[in-house]
Image (cartoon, rainbow, N blue to C red):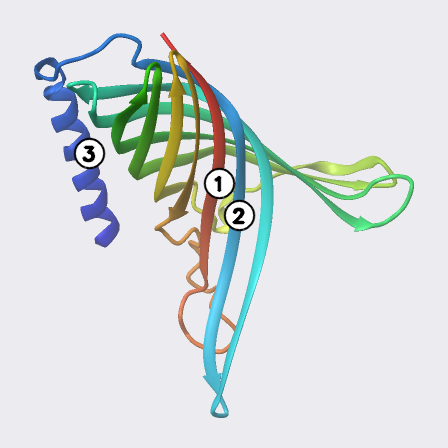
Amino acid sequence: MIMRKLMVNIVLLSFIVLLSSDLIAQSRNNMTFNVGYVNKTNSSKWASKVLNLQLSASDTISIHGITAGFEYFLLASDIIGFDLGLNYTYMFKKQVLVSGSTFTGNKYNYHSLDAPIRFMLSLPIGKDFKILLFAGPKLTFDIAGTQRTYINGSQIGESKDIYDGSLHRSRFDVMLGPGVGLRYKNLIFRGGYDLGLLNLNLNDNANDLFSNKKLQIKQEHIYFKLGIAF
């Protein structure tokens, strides 16, 4: 229910922004093409009290990736407005299970899309320079994910779909976070952090070790991008 209300509010916000675009004073060179680096961290956490002892544990997996896409700065008076966009990200991870001269372990690949809908400020700090401040939601959707297992450098069996129903992993998330950037003429460097708000675990039978609560799996993104405005 909470997720549904959140999605409705985000869609309504996007609709209002798009409808009002003709009423907002636009400057030139607000469409940007961006490329950059993304680090994704999936974490699962639980905490419980057993025999009057407070117990907690966590597990994290870090995945590297490259991202590219388009974003548009919808600004009033070239200062305040929204950052809207669509980006594609390719992520990969190599998990070594046995050390040796040939690879034995798993290789993971992810393909995903994200659509930021962020509030932003563009503040001039001198001739040709601006500080950019961002804050707001980002919608993410994982298109595909595969796992390949190797023994002594040779693939064993077929690739596995990470999002197969038996794994109970959600493709969709709503993330929220801040960002900051520096613009020099048409060049833009920016970075930011996003925290996932939804539980990626869809398996109702996957509880933590000591309580009956559903295991929580969340994701975080750290990104750095270089863009050119046109």
User: Could you classify mark 3 by the number of other residues whose Cα lies within 10 Å: few (under 14), some (14-19), or many (20 or more)?
Assistant: few
Where is residue 71 drawn, in percent x and y? 35, 20
Q: CA distance from mark 1 to mark 3?
A: 25 Å
N-terminal-most mark, 2 or 1: 2
57 to 59, vertically: above or below? below
Q: Compute the Cα span from label 3 to label 2.
A: 27 Å
Q: Nearer the viewer, residue 68 or 229?
A: 229
Q: Is residue 166 left or right of residue 173?
A: right
- Neighbor class of circle 2 (other Cα within 10 Å; few <14, some 14-19, many 20+) is some
Q: Position of residue 174 (x, y in %)?
A: 33, 43
Secondary structure category for the residue under label 2? strand
Q: Is residue 8 left or right of residue 167?
A: left
List the residue tagged with mark 3: 11
- The answer to whether the residue labelled 2 contacts the one labelled 1, judged by CB atoms less than 8 Å apart, is yes
Q: State the residue lying farthest toward the bottom.
A: 51
Horizontal relation, residue 175 to residue 9: left or right: right
Image coordinates for residue 93, horizontal then vertical, percent: 65, 39
Work out whether 207 lies above or below 124. below
Nearest to the observer: residue 206 or residue 15: 15
Q: For the residues marked 2 and 1, what is the alpha-carbon distance in whole angstroms? A: 9 Å
Of marks 2 and 1, the one in the foreground: 1
- Name which residue lies at 40% across and 70% down: 213
The image position of residue 129, as x and y in percent, is: 36, 19
Q: Residue furthest right?
A: 101
Amino acid type, label 3: Val
Residue at 16% from the left image edge and 33% from the top image edge: 13
